[in-house]
């Protein structure tokens, strides 16, 4: 067999080599997206100062959180048409390429200091993520055969790429924006996306047969798009849509990180330190805190993945729905630390005279991270296991659309803090999230029956 024929079959550290191509593409894409997200709300809420690189749009917290929720919702909602176009016309491989190019244009446009460029750039990012996000995740699933126990581990590795990018994106973009100005930060995010696109072009040889259009004229699967769903496939589609409720609740709480918690960090958290760091001095920029979640994921991802692997080998409950419910409960519990933080804040008139300690914010992010590691990677894998082949990218798009609705819920809930107060909002999120997670555990058995054994795998010793 020739070298060319073997390229897409190569293994690296026990996984297809193509996984690591997609790992680095997603890493750079998330570097750009989370770098941009880390400064987005801060930029919108920053006061207007003429001829100052730190000048923002001077929006109120309510206006900022409303826009943030709508924008992030649209980013993920676009995954539905992005997945549909891939399934029906071009395949996931080409969709990822188109999405990457649009993202390069979008982030590059954000670097221009003009209002038309800001909103045009955001529009291009919305469309670009819609093409790239659902399709690259579907391609990861396509690297593995049905029933392969390494699939979930593969998604954890892929998830590490997401969070390495998110960590360095939020950290470096946050520092650059604080020191040199908002649009330099946006520009740095654009450079990251360009690097990701170069990796994708180089790595296509390791992705032969993955993400191709299965409805193509000469494809052996050209009739697949025309066949009706079976009873088993309909049941699996139903349980996937039900699982999206968990996703909406989870991200509706979790995405307070980029909205309410980001503004809270800027306005009500004591970020001073007793020593000086390069480019930071004695006060940590609020945007840098957006990197804490990704930092914890890098530390704990392998630990959590190995825990669930060993847990399953012992014959204990380890379905994706179970992990998602447990993850929701753990993540929701983290908001009790924000409840504690809100009790330390003292306001006199319109001025904050005493801020909360950083430790509560860090602990909240720790629990959010542990919950995310239980829920999010397996949710991606869950969709690739249950979705009919002809709707694979569409259902992944629907998953990200549910994530988008969660983002809009996050913005709406964040807006409530202006009237109800952070104490009530943080506590309410914690209680509701824990209660919803317990409800899922209570009805787990009938939900699992609808999967018809799709998650039955052979665990390797």
Image: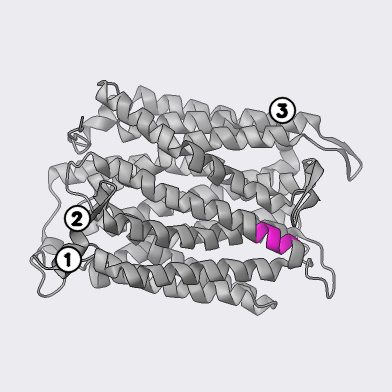
Q: Is residue 135 left or right of residue 450?
A: right
Which quadrant of the view contains residue 319? top left
Q: Which residue does the numbered mark 1 point to in the structure image?
A: 214
Which quadrant of the view contains residue 366? top right
Which quadrant of the figure contains the C terminus?
top left
Q: Which residue does the numbered mark 3 point to in the structure image?
A: 340
The numbered dot on residue 414 is none
Q: Which percent across, then down, holds residue 196?
A: 44, 67
- CB contact under 8 Å: marks 3 and 2: no
The numbered dot on residue 389 is 2
From mark 3 to mark 2, how far is it between C-alphas?
A: 47 Å
Chain part drawn in magenta: 173-178
Q: Is residue 105 left or right of residue 85?
A: right
Is 176 colored magenta in this rendering?
yes
Q: Which percent across, then down, holds residue 174?
A: 67, 57
Looking at the image, is mark 1 or mark 3 earlier in the sequence? 1
Residue for point 23% across, 42% down: 236
Q: Is residue 320 left or right of residue 388?
A: right
The image shows residue 379, relative to residue 216, as above or below, that is: above
Is 297 colored magenta in this rendering?
no
From mark 2 to mark 1, how far is it between C-alphas?
A: 9 Å
- CB contact under 8 Å: marks 2 and 1: yes
Q: Which percent across, then down, holds residue 419?
A: 74, 42
Local packing at callout 2 (Cα closer than 10 Å; few below 14, some 14-19, many 20+) is some
Residue for point 38% across, 74% down: 98
What main secondary structure does the magenta stretch of the protein show?
helix
Local packing at callout 1 (Cα closer than 10 Å; few below 14, some 14-19, many 20+) is many
Count up the numbered dots: 3
The image shows residue 275, relative to residue 4, as above or below, that is: above
Which quadrant of the figure contains the N terminus?
bottom left
The scheme the figure's colours follow is one colour
Looking at the image, is mark 3 or mark 2 earlier in the sequence? 3
């Amino acid at each position: 067999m020739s070298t060319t024929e073997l390229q897409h079959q190569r293994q690296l550290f026990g996984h297809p080599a193509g996984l690591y191509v997609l790992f680095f593409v997603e890493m750079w894409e998330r570097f750009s997206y989370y770098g941009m997200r880390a400064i987005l709300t801060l930029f919108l809420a920053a006061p207007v100062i003429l001829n100052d690189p730190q000048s923002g749009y001077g929006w109120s917290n309510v206006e900022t959180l409303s826009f943030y929720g709508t924008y992030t919702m649209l980013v993920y909602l676009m995954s539905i048409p992005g997945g549909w176009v891939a399934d029906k016309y071009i395949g996931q491989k080409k969709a990822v390429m188109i999405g990457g190019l649009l993202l390069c244009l979008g982030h590059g446009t954000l670097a221009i200091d003009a209002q038309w460029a800001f909103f045009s750039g955001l529009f291009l990012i919305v469309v670009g993520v819609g093409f790239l996000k659902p399709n690259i995740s579907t391609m990861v699933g396509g690297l593995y055969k049905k029933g392969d126990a390494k699939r979930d581990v593969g998604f954890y590795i892929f998830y590490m790429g997401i969070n390495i990018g998110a960590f360095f994106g939020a950290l470096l973009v946050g520092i650059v924006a604080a020191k040199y100005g908002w649009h330099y930060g946006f520009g740095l995010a654009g450079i990251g996306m360009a690097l990701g696109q170069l990796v994708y072009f180089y790595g296509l040889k390791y992705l032969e047969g993955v993400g191709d259009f299965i409805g193509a004229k000469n494809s052996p699967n050209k009739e697949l798009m025309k066949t009706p769903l079976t009873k088993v496939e309909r049941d699996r589609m139903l349980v996937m849509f039900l699982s999206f409720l968990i996703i909406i609740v989870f991200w509706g709480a979790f995405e307070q990180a980029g909205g309410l918690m980001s503004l809270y960090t800027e306005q009500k958290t004591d970020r001073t330190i007793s020593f000086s760091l390069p480019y930071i001095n004695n006060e940590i920029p609020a945007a840098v805190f957006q990197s804490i979640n990704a930092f914890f994921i890098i530390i704990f991802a392998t630990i959590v993945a190995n825990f669930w692997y060993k847990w399953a080998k012992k014959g204990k409950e380890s379905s994706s729905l179970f992990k998602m419910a447990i993850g929701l409960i753990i993540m929701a519990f983290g908001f009790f630390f924000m409840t504690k933080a809100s009790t330390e804040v003292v306001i006199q008139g319109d001025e904050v005279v005493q801020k909360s300690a950083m430790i509560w914010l860090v602990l909240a992010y720790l629990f959010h991270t542990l919950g995310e590691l239980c829920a999010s990677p397996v949710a991606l894998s869950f969709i690739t296991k249950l979705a009919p082949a002809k709707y694979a990218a569409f259902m992944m798009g629907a998953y990200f659309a549910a994530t988008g609705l969660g983002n809009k819920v996050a913005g709406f809930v964040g807006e409530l803090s202006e009237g109800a107060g952070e104490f009530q909002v943080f506590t309410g999120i914690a209680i509701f999230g824990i209660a919803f997670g317990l409800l899922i555990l209570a009805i787990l058995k009938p939900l699992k029956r609808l999967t018809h054994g799709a998650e039955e795998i052979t665990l390797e010793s």
